[in-house]
Amino acid sequence: MSLIQIQSLNKWYGDFHVLKNISENVQKGEVLVICGPSGSGKSTFIRCINRLEDFQQGTILIEGKDIKAPDVNINKLRSEIGIVFQQFNLYPHLTVLKNVTLAPIKVRNITRDEAEATALTLLERVGIHDQALKYPVELSGGQQQRVAIARALAMKPKIMLFDEPTSALDPEMINEVLSVMKDLARDGMTMLCVTHEMGFAREVADRVVFMDGGEVIEQGPPDVFFTNPKHQRTQAFLKEIL
Ligand code: ADP
Ligand code: MG
C-alpha cells in the first residue's frame, strides 16, 4: 500500500477550478519534486495533504486512512505531515530552541528535557546548534529556514512537505538549505517538494511532477523528465527555467 494515495482530487475557490482531478500515489521514502508555472496550483495541492486547505471532491489516504474521516484528529495529522514554507514562519518572540520544542511539548506531551535534547540533536543535524538561544531575527534567512525544518522534524513526521523553501533566500544561502533537504531525502524521508531547483530534482527526486492550470500534465523520473519531456507545455516550462 502506498503511504499517500490521492484519488481524483478536485478543488474550487468559488467558481475557479484550482485542482483538476489529481491522482497520485506516493510510496514510503519516495521524493517528489513538483514544479510548474506560478498559479498552477502547486501550493494548494500540497496544502490539501495536511488539510491546510479543504477540498470538495476526491480522497486523500495516508497509510490507508482517509484524512477527511470524521474521527481524524487534525492536530495529530499535521504533526505527522510537516510543512516548510517559503517565508519560514518562525515564532519571532521565541528563541530557536523554543521554536523547535513548543509543539512537541504541547502536542506530543513529552517533557521539556526530552524535547530540548531532541531539539539540540535536530539543530545539530541542520548545522545550527550553536544558534539555539538566539531569536529568529538574529539569524540569516538560510539559518531561519533550517530552524523551520528542524521544527517540523521535531514532531517526528512521516511525511515532509516543502513549499518553495529556497525561493525567499539570497543565492548564497540556497545550498545550505538544499543540502539539509538532500540529507533528509537520503535518510529515507517521504518528501513532496515544490521547488524550481532542478539540480536538486536531478540529484534526489524519484519523480518530477509538472503541473499547469491545476492539472498534472506530465511526470517521470528526472533523467526521463529532463531529457525527454513529452508535453509541449513541459518543454516550454523547462526552456524558461533551465
Ligand atoms: P502555485 O503555488 O502553483 O503558484 P497556488 O496553489 O498558490 O499556485 O494558486 C493556484 C491558483 O489559485 C492561483 O490562480 C491563485 O491565484 C488561486 N488561489 C490561491 N489561493 C486562493 C484563495 N485563497 N482564494 C482564491 N484563489 C486562490
Ligand atoms: Mg505556491
Image (spheres, rainbow, N blue to C red):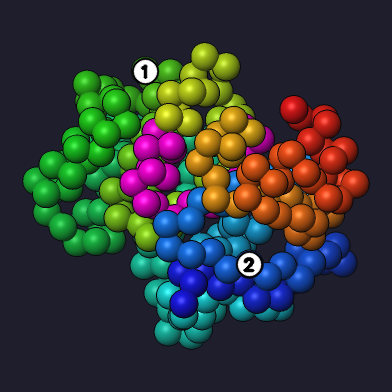
Residue type indicated by callout 1: Glu
Outermost residue toward the left in this view: 113
Query: Where residue 192 is drawn, which disc sits there?
Result: none
Q: Is residue 22 left or right of residue 136?
A: right
Q: Is residue 21 above or below residue 190?
A: below
Residue type indicated by callout 2: Glu
Magenta span: 180-197
Q: Which residue is identified by label 2?
A: 24
Secondary structure type for disc 1: helix
Residue 42 visible in the current orientation: no
Choose top left, top right, bottom left or bottom right for residue 101: top left
Camera-side mark, 1 or 2: 2
Q: Residue at x 53, y 36 (%)?
A: 203
Q: Is residue 37 above or below residue 134?
A: below
Choose top left, top right, bottom left or bottom right for residue 143: top left
Q: Is residue 9 left or right of residue 94?
A: right
Q: State the CA–CA distance, disc 1 to disc 2.
A: 40 Å
In the depicted view, which residue is nearer to us: 231 or 14?
Answer: 231
Q: Which residue is identified by label 1?
A: 138
Question: Quick check: is 229 in the magenta stretch?
Answer: no
Indicate the position of residue 94 as horizontal and vertical percent values.
31, 34
Q: Is residue 60 above or below residue 140?
A: below
